[in-house]
Amino acid sequence: DIQMTQSPSTLSASVGDRVTITCRASQNINIWLAWYQQKSGKAPKLLIYRASTLETGVPSRFSGTGSGTDFTLTISSLHPDDFATYYCQQYHSYYSFGQGTKLGIK
Amino acid sequence: QLQLQESGPGLVKPSESLSLTCTVTGDSIITTAYYWGWVRQSPGEGLEWLGTISSSGDTLYNPSLKSRLSISMDTSKNHFSLTLSSVTAADTALYYCARVHAPGVVRGGEFDPWGQGTLVTVSS
């Protein structure tokens, strides 16, 4: 099984801040990684796939980088709508998700 | 517009089977570009992939649940279903269905979109 570990688990930031979330895979997953945003009481929403490709309609302040085992999700300038929980997911071998990073208001 | 809607009982007794259905509108579940999957989220916890089914009916299950899990599809009703046997309190969760991009050159493995989820509680 491929384990996905996100850091930090919780993060506090302010509107306008630049934020980075890290996801590490327990083995090489190439670029087969997606990022999701989940707001309270809602289903996850796909933000990025193939590690760095922005899903249609997702604001350009979101970006993803990485390959192999280490990946990052960056929000260049936080908007009020961005406070949510973020998950990474690998699809190199079966599927598995990170434990999530809860982004809250400082 | 593609929509997925989960349905099924909200309360299941321990040791019984949990059965859910995901009805898809706006696309056919036999399209080869996509698979169809189930993910659950225990209260206050993260996401756990359960299993997926391809347009041809091939299934892939989370190894930790494989002995208790079955996913099937009914193309005449354009829906797919999940059955989880011998449930315990640990199976209490919000169950989501989702479309999964089939493996390809550009995409393959992303879950998008998702249903709104249905809460299943295991309790006597």
Image (spheres, rainbow, N blue to C red):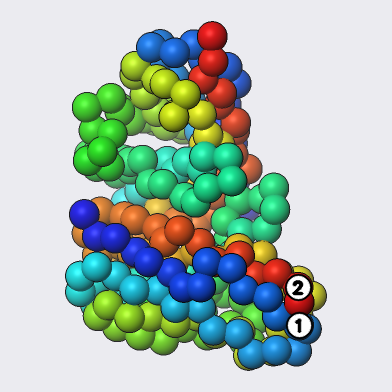
- The residue sitting at 35% across, 85% down in the picture is A66
Q: Give coordinates of residue A9: x percent, y percent.
A: 52, 66
Residue with the mark numbered 1: A14
For label 1, the SS is loop
> Which amino acid does the dot numbered 1 rest on?
Ser
Q: Quadrant of the C terminus of chain A?
A: bottom right
Residue at label 2? A105
Q: Does residue B37 appear anywhere in the picture?
A: no
| Crowd tier of the residue under label 2, counting other residues whose Cα lies within 10 Å: few below 14, some 14–19, many 20 or above | few
- Residue A28 screen position, x and y as percent: 20, 74
Asked whether residue B60 is in view, the answer is yes
Q: Are marks 1 and 2 in contact (CB under 8 Å)?
A: yes
Are dots 1 and 2 on a single chain? yes
Please give the label number shown on residue A35: none
The relative height of residue A95 versus residue B26 in the rendered view (above or below) is below
Q: Quadrant of residue A49?
A: bottom left
Mark 1 crowdedness (10 Å alpha carbons): few <14, some 14-19, many ≥20: some
- Looking at the image, is B74 positioned above or below residue B24? above
Marks 1 and 2, how far apart at CA: 6 Å
Give the quadrant of residue A98.
Answer: bottom left
Residue A92, horizontal then vertical, whole percent: 24, 65
Indicate the chain on which mark 2 is placed. A
Horizontal relation, residue B85 to residue A29: left or right: right
Residue drawn at point x = 44 percent, y = 13 percent: B14
Left or right of A11, for residue B81: left
Which sits in the foreground, A80 or B74? A80
Quadrant assignment, res A104 = bottom right
Q: Amino acid at mark 2?
A: Ile
Mark found first going from the N terminus, 1 or 2: 1
Tell me what residue is drawn at x 51 percent, y 20 percent: B122
Of the pair B102 and B83, the residue shown nearer to us: B83
